[in-house]
Image (tube, rainbow, N blue to C red):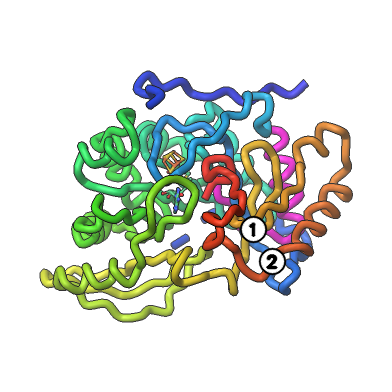
Amino acid sequence: MERTPELVTLEAAPRSAEGCVNAARPPAGKLVDAQGRNIHYLRVSLTDRCNFRCTYCSPAAHEPPDALLSRAELARLFRLFAALGVRRIRLTGGEPTLRKDVVEIVADAAATPGIEDVAITTNGHRLAELVEPLQAAGLGALNVSLDTLAPERLRGVSGQAARLDRILAGIDAAAGRFRSLKINTVVMPGVNEDEVAALVRYAWDRGALPRFIEQMPFGGGVPVPLSEVRRRLTEAGFTLAPDVFRGWGPARHMRGRDRDGREGLVGFIGAMTENFCEDCNRARIAADGGFQACLGGEDRVQLRDRMRAGDRDEALAEAVAGALGRKAPRHRMEEAGAGLVLLAMRGIGG
Ligand code: SAM
Ligand code: SF4
């Protein structure tokens, strides 16, 4: 019997650009979706649980621990997807660092033949203590969510468990250690729009890439269009010019410079007003093992149940190919208010 994943219990949790290269690459399979897009990038949610309660991230119905993929099941899926052509794995959640075995899972992913890059997205709460073991396990890239530099605002957005000092200490500990360090900010009207310039400077000063994300309709609130973020940066004295840099994800980048001569890239993820589906290269596995070809879609293939029922890898691969074969040209999140049922962000993992 495989052990079910254990989650770290956090006392302060009230309810309220780019590696690891493995020499031995397997012959690359090919995952291609219905629109002919190659899928190289797999996002895996390690848990739907979170110690934060961000207003834009809808509360998930928590899966019981044995519903989550075990470490062994995750490792099997990493191997399967790598053999099918996936080259990059991002671990997310929920809060992935709530899994007690997060470091081991990173090590498994990094050791999977064919996987060139392992990344993690975290709210930063446990980052300071995890930076060293994650680096030793082979983590290549780290995204930390940071919506504000004001402690009270942060609690207003993410709940009472969110402690700015812990997140900032984690970012400081991580700075300079990974191939890529990104700071992700969801821009919310009347909440943190006035901090975009400060967040860019904060990130640049730590060698990190600041990225602004348009809010998607998973929780409460409305998006601030990225055009407004760019307007505010310009107003604050930044010059911005389009840049060709492309990471693995949907972000578009601009090269910025502030009045003091600081320079760097700024990423913009315009999920709502600047649709990025055309060059989608990714697929997702939710915390409960549901394979989802599109973040904004409803079509899911239950890989956990198939594995537990004894399906062989060939059958799993066939099910995955079937889901990709049904993948729509673009997400329909704009219609979410009109009744499209979107799965909770925490379960899918952003
Ligand atoms: N808990 C981790 C964190 O917050 O970084 C990882 C999971 S979180 C779901 C992954 C990313 O999705 C975060 O950067 C978060 O800001 C973003 N996110 C959550 N809800 C969102 C929404 N409604 N629209 C846009 N981005 C969202
Ligand atoms: Fe938790 Fe991340 Fe969702 Fe915030 S965005 S509630 S930190 S999973």
The residue located at (48%, 23%) in the rendering is: 8
Q: Nearer the viewer, residue 58 or 286?
A: 58
Q: What residue is drawn where x is 24% and y is 53%?
A: 190
Q: Is residue 262 left or right of residue 244?
A: left
Q: Is residue 294 left or right of residue 307?
A: left
Seen in the image, is 284 located left or right of residue 56?
Answer: right
Q: Which residues are magenta?
A: 71-91
User: Are there few (<14), some (14-19), or many (20+) residues within 10 Å of tag 2?
Assistant: some
Ligand 1 closer than 8 Å to label 2 CB = no
- At 72% from the left and 63% from the top, the residue drawn is 327
For residue 58, above or below residue 36? above
| Other residues around mark 1 within 10 Å, as few (<14) / some (14–19) / many (≥20) | many
Determine which residue is flagged by label 1: 294
Residue 108, how many percent across, how many down?
A: 63, 40
Marks 2,1: beta carbons within 8 A: yes
Decide: is 197 above or below 94. Answer: below
Figure quarter occupied by ligand 2 = top left
Can you tell which mark lies on residue 328? 2
